[in-house]
């Protein structure tokens, strides 16, 4: 891809990522309560004034309004522009990864999973659960996304994808079974095979590194929270964010780490 085309692609990814992030704010706000994400239009939670289109421009409106509602001046949490920026960043990172590795065929699925991931991280931190309304549709979405990638690239790494899905299911599912659902939530178990299958499709190393990264991160944060007295041994930690960030690490670092390890072994 030439310079101008590359810049254009990144600009499109950033712009659409921001818009999707704006929609994710609605998802994060409504899906845990079982509300529709389509209707009604967004309103100020304080004064119920519908939010005009010009006040709904991702990040920019929040800055222009200095984080306050135009009608009643109630504070609008900084989380809204942060979710939009995080989604933009995820879109840019996925685009850059797909370009760098030549796996553009996988980009549509990665963008969907990355966007769902942003919503799931925030919802899990808020509510300590991963709603079925988001997690379950990821199964058909992943099947379609992988099939699309196979058709576009002509490569069908189905066996590593299955092994990845199974590995994630077992490693996340066993602690769930053993702890009686206290450590890990059922939502984590349902989400795991989707992430494992997609990473396995990329490379088995990516699935393994992602799984390890998720658990290591979870352990580090869990111990750190206990050390500063913010969590007891029995405090339930939302585990979804660790699985999702682990999956991102697996995607980005899996193959480079695996080849570094192999050349070290060959030493
Ligand atoms: Zn208001």
Image (spheres, rainbow, N blue to C red):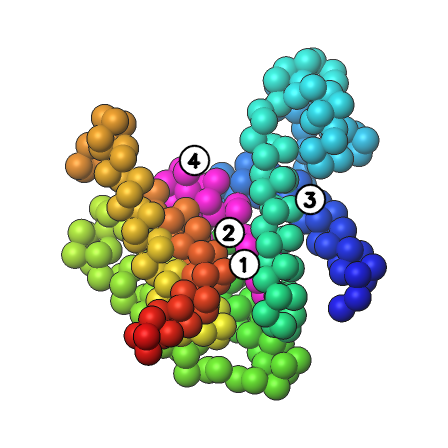
Residue 113's disc number: 1
Q: Mark 4 near mark 2, Cβ–Cβ under 8 Å?
A: no
Q: In front: mark 1 or mark 4?
A: 1
Q: Secondary structure at mark 2?
A: helix
Mark 1–mark 4 distance (CA, rounded to whole Å) = 20 Å
Mark 4 Cβ and ligand 1 under 8 Å apart: no
Q: Position of residue 115 (x, y in %)?
A: 58, 52
Q: Mark 2 near mark 1, Cβ–Cβ under 8 Å?
A: yes
Q: Position of residue 33 (x, y in %)?
A: 49, 39
Residue annotated with mark 4: 126
Mark 3–mark 1 distance (CA, rounded to whole Å) = 16 Å
Residue annotated with mark 3: 18
The answer, for residue 127, to whether it is visible in the render is yes
Q: Going 22% across and 56% down the picture, which residue do you hit?
A: 175
Q: In front: mark 4 or mark 3?
A: 3
Q: Mark 2, residues whose alpha carbon is within 10 Å: few (<14), some, or many (≥20)?
A: many
Q: Looking at the picture, does residue 252 appear above or below residue 203?
A: above
- Report the front residue among 92 and 264: 264
Q: Residue furthest front?
A: 267
Q: Mark 4, residues whose alpha carbon is within 10 Å: few (<14), some, or many (≥20)?
A: few
Q: Secondary structure at mark 3?
A: helix
């Amino acid at each position: 891809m030439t310079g101008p085309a590359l810049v254009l692609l990144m600009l499109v990814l950033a712009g659409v990522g921001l818009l999707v992030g704006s929609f994710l704010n609605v998802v994060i706000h409504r899906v845990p309560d079982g509300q529709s994400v389509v209707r009604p239009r967004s309103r100020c939670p304080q004064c119920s004034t519908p939010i005009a289109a010009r006040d709904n421009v991702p990040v920019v409106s929040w800055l222009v309004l200095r984080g306050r509602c135009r009608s009643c001046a109630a504070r609008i949490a900084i989380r809204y522009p942060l979710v939009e920026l995080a989604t933009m960043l995820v879109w840019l990172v996925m685009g850059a990864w797909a370009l760098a590795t030549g796996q553009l065929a996988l980009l549509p699925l990665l963008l969907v999973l990355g966007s769902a991931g942003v919503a799931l991280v925030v919802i899990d931190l808020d509510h300590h659960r991963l709603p079925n309304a988001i997690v379950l549709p990821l199964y058909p979405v992943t099947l379609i996304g992988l099939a699309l990638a196979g058709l576009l690239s002509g490569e069908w790494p189905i066996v590593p994808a299955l092994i990845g899905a199974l590995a994630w299911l077992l490693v996340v599912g066993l602690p769930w079974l053993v702890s009686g659902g206290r450590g890990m939530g059922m939502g984590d178990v349902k989400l795991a095979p989707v992430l494992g299958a997609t990473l396995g499709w990329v490379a088995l190393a990516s699935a393994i590194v992602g799984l390890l990264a998720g658990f290591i991160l979870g352990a580090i944060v869990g111990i750190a929270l206990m050390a500063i007295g913010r969590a007891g041994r029995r405090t339930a930690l939302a585990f979804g964010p660790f699985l999702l960030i682990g999956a991102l690490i697996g995607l980005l670092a899996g193959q480079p780490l695996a080849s570094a390890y192999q050349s070290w072994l060959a030493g």
